[in-house]
Image (tube, rainbow, N blue to C red):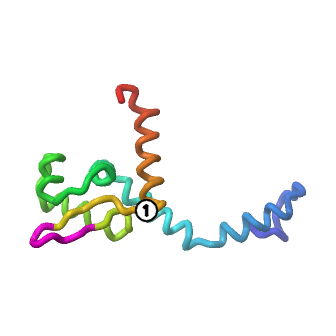
Amino acid sequence: MNNKGLPHQHGEKQENAMIQEQINQVSNFQIVADIFKQLGDTTRIRIFWLLCHCEECVINISAILEMSSPAVSHHLRPLKNSGLIVSRRDGKEVYYRAADTPQSQLLHQMIEQVMKIACPEI
């Protein structure tokens, strides 16, 4: 979107300049895409949602989701790498919970709102 060469000028030059500046920040959009990519999997959404409500170890998450511990660990890794969840070690046990960040909180709220809208039984 080049301000000088837009095919149709509609008198929004100032807004176009702001939009142009933002749209050229490809790395910002990549960060958002990477976070949404983590939530493109039902299991990861379930794990993330669970960890928004409590702190749990892999064994308990596995039991709650009726999955193997290695499968749960496979899903925890990208959630942690994206900064949506954090972990703490207590002896040999590692506990996971949702990160206390604006991004994590917003995604949690978004998941719950979509569930309310899309799932009438909730």
Instruction: State the residue at coordinates (40%, 37%).
Output: 115
Residue nearest the observer in this picture, 68 or 3: 68
Residue nearest the observer in this picture, 49 or 13: 49
Instruction: State the residue at coordinates (48%, 62%).
Output: 33
**Residue 55 in the figure: left or right of residue 8:** left
**Residue 74 inside the magenta-drawn segment:** no
Residue nearest the observer in this picture, 72 or 53: 53
Please tell me whether residue 85 is drawn above or below residue 91 in the rendered image. Answer: above
Q: Check the picture and name the quadrant holding the N terminus.
A: bottom right
Q: Position of residue 32 (x, y in %)?
A: 50, 63
**Residue 41 in the figure: left or right of residue 65:** right
Please tell me whether residue 59 is drawn above or below residue 111 in the rendered image. Answer: below
Name the magenta segment's main secondary structure.
strand
> Secondary structure beneath disc 1?
helix
Q: Pointer 1: what residue?
A: 35
Count of numbered labels shown in the rendering: 1
Give the residue furthest to the front.
Answer: 90
As shown in the figure, which amino acid type bears the numbered disc 1?
Ile
Instruction: State the residue at coordinates (26%, 52%).
Output: 54
Q: Which portion, as a residue range, is magenta?
A: 87-93
| Quarter-of-image position of residue 37 | bottom left
**Residue 90 inside the magenta-drawn segment:** yes
Instruction: State the residue at coordinates (11%, 57%).
Output: 59
Please tell me whether residue 111 is drawn above or below residue 33 in the rendered image. Answer: above
**Residue 23 in the figure: left or right of residue 66:** right
Q: Position of residue 17 (x, y in %)?
A: 79, 68
